[in-house]
Image (cartoon, helix red, strand yellow):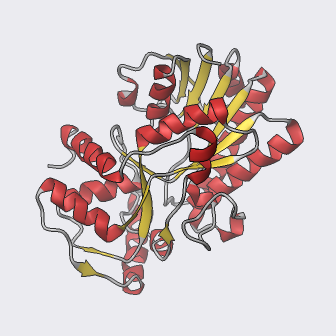
Amino acid sequence: MNGETILVTGAAGFVGASVARAFGAAGYRVRVLVRASSPRDNLLGLDAEIVTADLMDAGAVAAACTGAAGVVHVAADYRLWARDPEEIVRNNRTQTENVMRGALAAGVGRVVHTSSVATLGLDRLPADETDPLTPDRAIGAYKRSKVVAERLVEAMIAADGLPAVIVNPSTPIGPRDVRPTPTGRIIVEAATGKIPAFVDTGLNLVHVDDVALGHVLALECGRIGERYILGGQDVSLRTMLGDIARLVGRKPPTIALPRGPLFPLAWAAEAVAQITGREPFLTADALRMAGHHMYFTSEKAEAELGYTARPYGVALADALAWFGAAGMLR
């Protein structure tokens, strides 16, 4: 498929921008689908055909798929909080269905669906691809939306012959996090001295450009119907905050907080958010998720795709450098 056209959704966003660049670097012609309202900062310098359309518009999505050899669906409603949480679920399900049906109608040869490790169980650590969640086991609307979307893709693979491969990135960090993402917000807040304490949790951090290359490998080498974790390194929150402090010349936080007393603060923050419409920094769902060490293994992707990830410290340094250059660490 090298040299042919690949459609990437969500290319104005953090992961999508890196994915689009990775396909361009690999020799593909890149077509990106972005909303009219999407900021274009991440598209600067990108050699791509830009199609303006809304993923909720099935006809426009189908038209964008026409003539593409592959479709990579990265776009998602990535919010951990909304006034109407079910809006997140509806958006991610509908947008995914529109992209998958558009790809089928256009006769696309290969589809990569960007899911998340949020769709996987954590009963055994490090977790792998063998414990897919059902919607009722997912914590919060965002995770539930990703489960619903992934199960939809699997159903279409089985029933409609959708030629799709699923990738499950862990927690990407690095350059071009313009929003920023929830993890990017933690990095910015920690680097500016606004996180004096931590809870006992952990996550798997990976450079966004490694995740992007994993998408290229999935398109070229992935087995249809399979899912592949695209992860990096398991890191405790305390270690992450300490490394951020070291990189910016601050003292690391040393106060460990229990999660329980933080729930009233989260509920209060969410109540204020209902009035202001601004996403709160602390949410009850985030605290529930923090009750788990979200550790994952990428052994399957390494073995089948040739996937690799650089040390997480490199990703963290790149993220801080980008946030600093963007004026977000003042």
Give the farthest residue toward the right. 159
Residue 266 picture location, percent across and down:
40, 74
Vertical side of 17 occupied by 113: above or below: below
Residue 119 picture location, percent across and down:
63, 59
In depth, the one of 51 and 166 nearer the eye is 166
Vertical side of 117 occupied by 5: above or below: above
Vertical side of 155 occupied by 235: above or below: below
Q: Is residue 12 visible?
A: no
Whether residue 78 sits left or right of residue 277 in the image: it is: right
Residue 277 picture location, percent across and down:
42, 57
Whether residue 17 sits left or right of residue 125 in the image: it is: left
Residue 95 picture location, percent across and down:
66, 40
Give the farthest residue toward the front. 303
Q: State the image quarter where residue 70 is shown.
A: top right
Total marks shown come to: 0
Image point (17%, 63%), residue name: 193
Q: Is residue 68 visible?
A: yes
In depth, the one of 271 and 70 nearer the eye is 70
Which image quarter is the N terminus in?
top right
Whether residue 169 sits left or right of residue 63 in the image: it is: left
Image point (42%, 68%), residue name: 202
